[in-house]
């Protein structure tokens, strides 16, 4: 990382409707060629920040530079530098996939011929050939999202700003999207800033991640360093087939410390303690009541909760 | 830990020119036209039928109308088709785009906003041509008017299309809620209906002044003069120019409202 592609300083934004402070003094640097994530639960201020990065919303206070250009003072400059994918693209719904991609390319300054060629390539790259001539409105949710990603990738922009690009996609389509993004990063040095509340995705594809909560950045580093810095604890997940045998001392001990979701218990323990507890459970009478169990190292969700995040509606897929 | 000390301040990258105005308007025009093929065909049929129905009604009610009255009615009916689509439906469309955040898509692109508004408005105006022509021809036949200068329906549609779509776009983008945009579009169309269809001589004196403030009046007068067989090049030109000027102002207002709606 030699240069910052995106610099955010002290950005604060309060919505007039209801006086909600969506961003509260946010500082960030995103390096050139980095895949950088904004992770947090719904309402954490991720989309608000992204809208400000692309000049769609103006912060009350603070500075945002994209590739050295002041986006707050001159919002129109963002469209030249940034390809933006919103949470949905209702403007394109009535267009066939190929036309939607070509239209975006044309509106980014490509000639009609170049736009058509790019649309054909993108449709092929993202596996949309079968539905290329169908309007987005007639596609399934996942196909429509994939078409919107294709549209966002039309015409080269040095920064990709993607708000939940893989929301609603099946695993195969997710891989297509990540491969397409990786190709642009590797061959063109594109910088990627993306919003997600999917912990698994954040851990596997991001170079660095900023965790947001209530409009503030509560942590920012590589996923590995964040997890190592927070805790040595591991997470023990137990799923009960029958009612848990509370008479078992190990079960009653875990029950007091577990977060219970239906028949699933989630307990955070020191690694030695978790191993010992799992050993007793799997060799004792309680095993007959167990349906499934997992022992895992800390996730970004654990980091989020350990740092004082309030909600726990992060997605694990 | 939110800043990385290894990152150096960047030198600004060079920015290429923005997407050209005409290229943007053309792309948006095609986008809106594609949508219109799906959504507006039946509505245009309704708009044409509505105008033809009004003409039939007035033909039955007005006994032995003179040529001026007949021409005013047919011209008003033809321009009403334009008002239904380019004012009423366009106001609803922009109101829905604003409410549904469709404007963000365009605002995040390096495309001139005025061209986005113009491209959308032009596609709606284009859709009105067949209905307005059918109404003018059928109306002329119904009221026994000469066909010699009926070609003036084309400049009349262009003039009213520009002026009314500017108003429609501005109303749709200025209204804070989609429902209010719909109401504003309906009220605008109602104004065109009454002030365009009723011959000026039959209007109360107070309302006649108001008629001149309605953007479609100039197009109605162009077509009415043609249907009377008394149109002059000078008269046509200044009325078309007045409509275009009206359209330019309202489209500029709409473009400003677009930027404000996105930044709200």
Image (spheres, coloured by chain):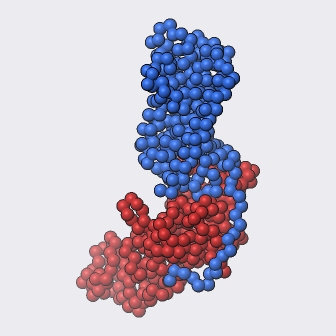
Chain colours: A red, B blue
Residue displayed at 51% across by 31% down = B214
Q: Is A70 rendered above or below residue A17?
A: below
Query: Residue B87: image x %, image y %?
Result: 52, 36
- Across and down, in percent, residue A81 comes to 65, 64
Which residue is at a point 64% across and 28% down the rendered structure image? B238
Residue at 53 percent of width and 38 percent of height: B167
Which image quadrant is residue A15 in?
A: bottom left
**Where is B167 relative to A260, above or below?**
above
Comparing A306 with A110, the one in front is A110
Q: Residue furthest bottom?
A: A272
Tell me: B187 left or right of B152. left
Q: Quadrant of residue A290?
A: bottom left
Which of B212/B59 is in front?
B212
Q: Position of residue B74 (x, y in %)?
A: 55, 19
Q: Is residue A110 visible?
A: yes
Does residue A45 appear in this view? no
Q: Residue at x 71, y 70 (%)?
A: A187
Direction right: furthest residue: A113
**Towards the viewer: B222 or A1:** B222
């Amino acid at each position: 990382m030699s240069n910052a592609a995106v610099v955010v300083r002290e950005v604060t934004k309060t919505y007039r409707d209801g006086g909600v402070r969506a961003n509260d003094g946010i500082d960030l640097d995103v390096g050139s060629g980095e895949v950088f994530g904004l992770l947090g639960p719904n309402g954490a201020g991720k989309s608000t920040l992204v809208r400000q990065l692309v000049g769609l919303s103006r912060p009350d206070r603070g500075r945002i530079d994209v590739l050295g250009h002041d986006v707050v003072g001159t919002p129109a400059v963002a469209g030249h530098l940034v390809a933006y994918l919103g949470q949905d693209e209702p403007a394109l719904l009535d267009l066939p996939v190929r036309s939607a991609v070509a239209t975006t390319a044309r509106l980014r300054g490509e000639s009609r011929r170049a736009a058509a060629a790019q649309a054909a390539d993108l449709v092929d790259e993202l596996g949309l050939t079968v539905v290329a001539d169908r309007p987005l409105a007639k596609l399934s949710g996942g196909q429509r999202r994939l078409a919107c990603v294709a549209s966002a990738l039309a015409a080269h922009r040095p920064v990709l700003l993607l708000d939940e690009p893989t929301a609603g996609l099946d695993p195969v389509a997710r891989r297509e999207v990540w491969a397409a993004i990786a190709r642009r990063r590797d061959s063109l040095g594109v910088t990627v800033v993306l919003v997600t509340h999917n912990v698994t995705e954040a851990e596997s594809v991001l170079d660095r991640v900023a965790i947001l909560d209530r409009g503030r950045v509560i942590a920012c580093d590589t996923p590995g360093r964040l997890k190592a810095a927070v805790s040595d604890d591991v997470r023990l997940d137990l799923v009960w087939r029958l009612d848990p045998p509370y008479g078992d001392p190990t079960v009653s001990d875990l029950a007091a410390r577990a977060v219970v979701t239906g028949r699933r218990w989630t307990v955070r323990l020191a690694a030695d303690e978790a191993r010992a507890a799992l050993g007793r459970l799997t060799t004792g009478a309680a095993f007959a009541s167990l349906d499934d169990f997992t022992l895992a190292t800390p996730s970004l969700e654990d980091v989020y909760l350990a740092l004082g995040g309030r909600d726990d509606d992060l997605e694990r897929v | 830990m939110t800043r990385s000390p290894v990152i150096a301040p960047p030198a600004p990258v060079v920015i290429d020119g923005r997407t050209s105005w005409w290229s943007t308007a053309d792309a948006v025009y095609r986008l809106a036209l594609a949508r219109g093929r799906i959504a507006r065909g039946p509505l245009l049929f309704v708009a044409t039928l509505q105008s033809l129905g009004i003409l039939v009604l007035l033909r039955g009610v007005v006994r032995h109308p003179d040529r001026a009255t007949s021409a005013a009615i047919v011209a008003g009916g033809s321009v009403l088709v334009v008002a239904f689509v380019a004012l009423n439906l366009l106001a609803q469309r922009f109101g829905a785009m604003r409410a549904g955040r469709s404007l963000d898509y365009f605002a995040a692109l390096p495309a001139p906003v005025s061209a986005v508004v113009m491209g959308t408005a032009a596609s709606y105006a284009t859709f009105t041509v067949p209905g307005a022509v059918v109404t003018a021809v059928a109306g002329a036949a119904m009221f026994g008017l000469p066909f010699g200068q009926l070609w003036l329906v084309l400049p009349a549609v262009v003039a009213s299309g520009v002026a009314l779509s500017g108003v429609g776009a501005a109303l749709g983008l200025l209204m804070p809620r989609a429902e209010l945009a719909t109401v504003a579009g309906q009220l605008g169309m109602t104004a065109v209906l009454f002030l365009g269809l009723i011959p000026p001589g039959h209007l109360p004196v107070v309302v006649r002044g108001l008629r001149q403030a309605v953007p479609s009046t100039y197009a109605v007068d162009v077509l009415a003069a043609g249907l009377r067989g008394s149109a002059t090049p000078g008269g046509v030109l200044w009325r078309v120019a007045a409509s275009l000027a009206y359209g330019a102002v309202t489209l500029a207002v709409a473009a400003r409202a677009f930027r404000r709606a996105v930044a709200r």
